[in-house]
Amino acid sequence: MRNLALVLLLLNIVFLSWQLLLPQPNQVNQPNQPNQVNQPNQANQANQANQANQPNQVNPENSDYSHPIPSPEPEELNQPPACFHIGPYTDKEKLDELINLLKSNKNINFEQFEVQTSHTRVLRSIWVYLPPFKSKLAAKNAIQSLKQAGFKDYRIVAKGQFQNAISLGLYNKPLYAEIRVKNLKRKGYKNIKTQKRYKDVTKYVLNVRIPTNQQALLLNMFQEKFQESLPKAVHCH
């Protein structure tokens, strides 16, 4: 019995020693305290304090900003219109076709169409001739001389102011008339005469006015379809 008591005493001492050596239950796998889990550090606290004192700032790109920023008025509202002269044309029907075509263009806002009319004299032809001879017989003798010199295209004027004159050609370009005169003078005909003949022509110029920001559209349209009569920019009246 005495030995049994000693064994039990030793076991109690060993158990108590083991209990003392073990860590306390509140230190093993002790969870973080609630006030430490989400507690911000001092720097975060300072930032939050500063943000609380700052006025609210809105980034228009990242938020539904309900107050629109006023935009400046378009520049074209303050710009004068652009004006152009188109022509001149001598064919009224051709001009009317052009006006109808321009009006049908939905990309250009024509603010004004105005047709300006003018009358002028233009060179129609140049007449090359030998002055009237005293008689028809003298004119015929001159014709034979021209034929022997190798010239063609001539005739005797039968009546009127230039009766018995010899017509040597009617030319619509001055250069051709000059060549004819030089050839005749080279053959000895020194008294060659020329007469310019004119005709009255009505010319039409189309004046248009469009917004300034559409003038490139107008110029491109004419470069593609009407290169023979490109619009000319002028001051608006």
Image (tube, rainbow, N blue to C red):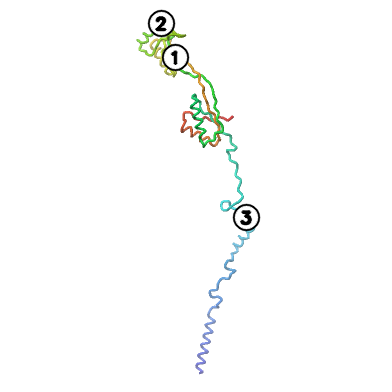
Q: Residue at x 47, y 18 (%)?
A: 124
Could you tell me residue 56's position as x and y percent? 62, 55
Q: Nearer the viewer, mark 3 or mark 2?
A: 2
Q: Nearer the viewer, residue 23 or 145?
A: 145
Residue at the disc numbered 2: 136
Could you tell me residue 118's position as x and y percent? 54, 22
Q: CA distance from mark 1 to mark 2?
A: 20 Å
Q: CA distance from mark 3 to mark 1?
A: 93 Å
Residue at the disc numbered 1: 127
The amino acid on which the numbered mark 3 sits, given as a three-letter code, is Asn
User: Given contact means CB atoms under 8 Å apart, are the residues at marks 3 and 2 in contact?
Assistant: no
Q: 10 Å neighbourhood of mark 1: few (<14), some, or many (≥20)?
A: some
Residue at the disc numbered 3: 56
User: Given contact means CB atoms under 8 Å apart, are the residues at marks 1 and 2 in contact?
Assistant: no
Q: Earlier in the sequence, mark 3 or mark 2?
A: 3
Q: Nearer the viewer, mark 3 or mark 1?
A: 1
Q: Earlier in the sequence, mark 1 or mark 2?
A: 1
Residue 38, quarter of picture: bottom right
Which quadrant, please, contains the C terminus?
top right
Q: Nearer the viewer, residue 112 or 104?
A: 104
